[in-house]
Image (cartoon, grey):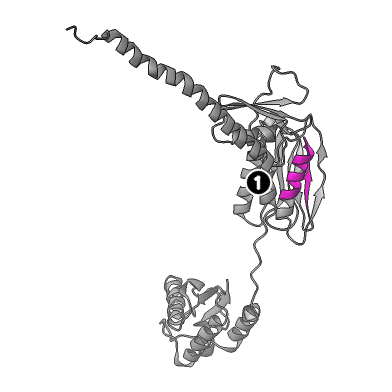
Amino acid sequence: MPGPVRRPLVIWLLAALAVPVLLTAILVPARAGTTEDDLRARTEAALKARGIEAGRVDFDGRDASVTVPQGADDTQVREIVAAVDGVRAVRIDHAGQAVGSTPSPTITSTPAQSDVPAFEVGRTDRSIRVQAPVRSQAVKDALGAEVRQVLGPDREYDDRTTIDPANGLGDATPLTALLRALAIGTGDASVRYDGQTLTLSGQVPDQATKATVGRAAAKAVPGAVVADQLVLPAPPKTAVSEPCRTFPTRLAQFTRQYRINFLSGTSIVNDASKPSVIKAAALLKSCPTAQIEVAGHTDNLGSPSTSLPLSERRAAAVKAELVRLGVAPGRITANGYGEAFPIASNTTGAGRIANRRVELRTR
């Protein structure tokens, strides 16, 4: 009885290889079509969300081709499409443009220095000013919206923008950071670009704002020369209290009325003068900012070589007592002048007592 017929092994091997090939041929086009449809749908939705009606959106793999009406902002459309997840390249065509014509070059969100026209952005206490050519009404409206966000209740928008499709700004982004930085503070300030140099002028409230405006200007026109002429406000003058305002007069009166004298040949204040030192401390503490010199003097009974160091010790002794009574030591300088400046005759005992003294005076 004949056995079962066996198929050649090679036929089974060929069948096993053919199945994956056929599946790949069927599934890959379907998957590619699904990916392109998904990118197209998400791109159209992104454009509509920004108020842009594209005439046609096509994809070749992940490369987009978008047809827009004449006069549309190419830069804005390109940025929106490029931001869609999965898009690799963007080509912009205009309605009526022949298919296959050379696509526009890719433009980044911040134009190169040579592509930025001259402009000026400034503020006063009453307004924010923008003077610049822009490529379309959409860019003009975007600038206006940004200004309204930073105006505040007390300022107006001084709109000096003009529409220039050939040479205007294609995007509001370069000026956005400048508007926000200049809105800080009061008074006049501006950033002006003449095609080569960015000139920053006017007043800003502090160093941090000055740095912020400088960074925003450099970002608006990369590579431009920046002439920073911004100034900071002068520091406020410290108000002088009434006790300090009258302190020099009161000290002069004290010196005429009260004496601080010493025992002969010593740096010991005599008993009659000790209350004067206490009164002096109270006077000095009434104006904590006053700087004082304690000047020591002697009579002429000693030699010049001994009188000078004795006068210095007398000044130092009074300073030490004033500090003990609560006067800050950094406010007091002690100096000795020997017998060089008598205030009375050294021929009498009373005169010599008067000359053995210290005097307080402002520095």
Residue 124: image quadrant is bottom right
- Say which quarter of the image contains residue 38: top right
Quarter occupied by the N terminus: top left
How many discs appear? Answer: 1
Secondary structure of the residue carrying numbered label 1? helix
Tell whether 119 sits left or right of 224: right
Residue, far front: 1
- Image coordinates of residue 100 in percent, x first then y, are 69, 16
Q: Is residue 32 left or right of residue 59?
A: left
Across and down, in percent, residue 352 comes to 51, 85
Kindly tell me whether residue 337 is visible in this rendering.
no
Which one is in front, 142 or 169? 142
Residue that sits furthest to the left in the current view: 1
Q: Is residue 197 visible?
A: yes
- Identity of the residue drawn at 56% across and 24% down: 61
Magenta residue span: 128-146
Circle 1 residue? 177
Where in the figure is residue 346, as x and y percent of width and height?
Answer: 53, 83
Q: Residue at x 74, y 45 (%)?
A: 143
User: Considering only vertical position in the picture, is 348 above or below 205?
Assistant: below
> 1 and 5: which one is in front?
1
Image height check: is 81 above or below 26? below
The residue sitting at 57% across, 28% down in the picture is 36
What type is the residue that disc 1 sits on?
Ala
Residue furthest to the bottom: 272
Residue appearing at x 58%, y 84% in the figure:
255
Q: Residues within 10 Å of mark 1 (few under 14, many from 20)?
A: some
Horizontal placement of 232 versus 322: left or right? right
Q: Is residue 32 above or below residue 357?
A: above
Residue 305: x and y, percent? 43, 70
Residue 142 in magenta stretch: yes
What quarter of the picture does the C terminus occupy? bottom right
